[in-house]
Amino acid sequence: MEKMSTEIATLFQKIPDGSKEYADIKDIFLDDSNMELVEDSVSVIKFLNNSRKALLLIKFKYFLRGLNYESVEKENINKLIAYVDTQEKAEFITNSFDKIISSNSKLSCCIMGLLLNDMTKRKRDITQEELMILQVLPMLNDFDIKNFFYLYNIVAKRKGKYHNIVSSDIECCAKKCNTVKKNIYLTIGVLEKYGLIDKEADVSLDLDENNFDMSSVDYDEDVFFNSLSEKLYGYAQVLFLE
């Protein structure tokens, strides 16, 4: 408990004291009762009456799993402390903590950790695509993450320039996830809303100049994964390695 509390305190010391917008985030992650759960979640949950704190710490532990992927020590944030050497990086890391707090999914939190692990390991700045993924992850739930992974996996096995999604893919994904097609469509709707799926329409007009009533319009719509979903899939693979 003391070790993790010290590490988080060290990380937040790199953020200017005058940054009032981060005050709530500091308070949440530096609370002693929260840190107890990081060290011994099973025993401390019995003494936590506040479900919000319990849920937060579960999500934070999943974040740590991703952050320390392939590391011997699974619960430390030393790499984040070393990574923060500019104001921009400090604000980005704090924003990431905010995403953990607001996330609807523990699996999303793990992916956030994987993303930050990759950045700190390569000692590089975040890209615009990664920043967009970070914005989307809190909006996805665990079902969305699972549905997305298996649907992308099915679609990507077909060769082609674009990863088009067809009805047979959705049916196959539903069986793989032991759910109904309606739920896969719900996930597709969320992915489209937040820019992880694109649509491309093709309108063909067959005009009969002599008889307009005989004219026709054909409308086809392609739904496909884009570069954002490709990058997200790269991180999500770690969660579903068999």
Image (tube, rainbow, N blue to C red):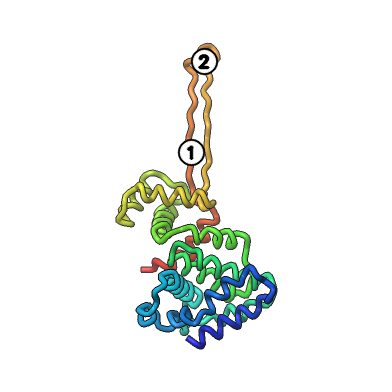
Q: Is residue 177 above or below residue 82?
A: above
Q: Nearer the viewer, residue 124 or 113?
A: 113
Q: Residues within 10 Å of mark 2 (few under 14, many from 20)?
A: few
Which residue corresponds to the image point at 42% horizontal and 52% vertical from the top-left? 187
Q: Nearer the viewer, residue 130 or 210?
A: 130
Secondary element at tag 1 = strand
Q: Secondary structure at mark 2?
A: helix
Q: Based on the displayed image, in which of its 4 quarters is residue 145 positioned?
A: bottom left
Tell me which numbered mark, 2 or 1, is placed earlier along the sequence: 2
Residue lying farthest to the bottom in this orientation? 2
Q: Which residue is mark 1?
A: 221
Q: Residue at x 43, y 67 (%)?
A: 106
Give the position of the C terminus as an image quadrant. bottom left
Horizontal and vertical percent position of residue 15: 66, 76
Q: Which residue is mark 2?
A: 212
What type is the residue that disc 2 sits on?
Answer: Phe
